Image (cartoon, grey):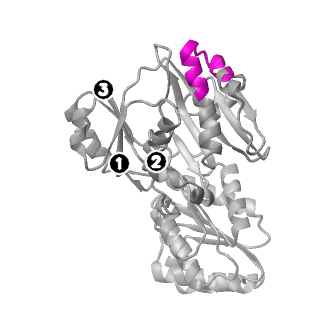
Amino acid sequence: MRLYEYEAKRLFRRYGIPVPESMVIDNNIWELENAVFPVVLKAQTLIGGRGKSGGIQFANNLDEAKKKIEELKKMKIKGYTVEKVLVEKKMEIAKEYYICATIDRIEHKPVLIVSLKGGVDIEEIAKTSPESIIKLYQEPGEKLAPHVGRDIAIEMGFKGENCIKVGNAINALYNDIFLGLDCKLVEINPFISTKDGKGYALDAKMDIDSDAIFRHPELSDYEVIVRHEVGELTEREKIAKAANIPYVDLDGYIGVFPGGAGFGIAAIDLIKHFGGEPANFMDSGGGPTPERMKTMLGLLMDNPKVVAIFGARFGGISRCDDWAKAVIQYIRENKPKKPMIMRMAGNMEEEARNMFEQARKETPELFSNVKIYAFDTPIEEVIKETVRVAKEILAKEKKVEVN
């Protein structure tokens, strides 16, 4: 369960991690009169990327703050509506750091990561300045020793009493919050030092293991709302969930209409490999019904970011001709404009191809944007073709350059 920034910071404050003075504004706009300006206005969403989307603003006075808060509350960030705005004291930053506790999926261990160079793009820092990153692996359930946080704070350049406070904050982040609250992720980016040598968490991301929520009734004491997973879904993900279709929205422009989870994962990797950007993950499941497949296609056709669709079916228990019937029926009923580039192989492959050819002869205008490849064309070539077509469309819309 992901927490809003303001919820995570309430927990930070409870466990001694310093955060700026703040208030949360939803319908209580009058409370802004108590703010000390200048302030930072931060849209509260459960998804990243708000800074690049204009979800973080600055205000120097009350009127400016009111106006910008109203603008923020009208926004949608990657499909998520903004209902609350965190108003924080604007801090003077001397230096930025990155602090994170998470699970290393390769090492199969919890890890504390601290970067002596902070900033938005920690991945880029890892590439360009790996020597600035501290990684401490722990055994599952093992707490940090008391001196560890102080040692790291010294490395970060904090002095005296401020060093002790930051060291205690690092230990609290790992021991009390990450371990104590069964978190999958606790991240501060950036953690800062001010000109007077103090440390503050300017941002906060927390993800608590949903299966462990029942062990933490104390969350309600800090006004952390235990929300069902559906509260974190985009509108398309909610539609898919209602239809029992595994589906995840991504940020790209190529829709993925696979014949199974394996094909879906492979397609995402190959689209990225050949320079494209996938728009989703999806799984049709075994023996999908025509209605299920039409819902799947509808999710992609209704996504305004999707400009082209890659589809694949390896016929086994789920036959290629059944898949073809559903796709043809959807095209005839909905008359989609987006190009569909698909590959079929396996059980009833020839019959399925014949069905598409017959449909093309009967209504050529509906199937002019549909290309069907068979077993003799490698899936890599089909995906290359899809990426090429998608980039050409985007180039015409002047959204990307074609390499």
Residue type indicated by callout 3: Pro
The answer to whether the residue labelled 3 contacts the one labelled 2, judged by CB atoms less than 8 Å apart, is no
Which SS class for mark 1? loop
Quadrant where the N terminus is found in the figure:
bottom right
The answer to whether the residue labelled 2 contacts the one labelled 1, judged by CB atoms less than 8 Å apart, is yes
Mark closer to the chain start, 3 or 2: 2
The answer to whether the residue labelled 3 contacts the one labelled 1, judged by CB atoms less than 8 Å apart, is no
The span picked out in magenta is 151-168
Residue at 62% across, 51% down: 276
Write down the residue under mark 2. 4
Q: Along the horizontal axis of the image, is 272 left or right of 198?
A: right
Give the alpha-carbon distance from disc 3 to disc 2, as whole Å.
Answer: 23 Å
Work out whether 272 lies above or below 367.
Answer: above
Label 2 crowd bin: few (<14), some (14–19), many (20+), radius 10 Å: many
Write down the residue under mark 1. 84
| x and y, in percent, of residue 274 in the image | 68, 50
Q: Along the horizontal axis of the image, is 347 left or right of 304?
A: right
Q: State the residue in front, 294 or 196.
A: 196
Q: Along the horizontal axis of the image, is 182 left or right of 291?
A: right
| x and y, in percent, of residue 378 in the image | 77, 64
Write down the residue under mark 3. 38
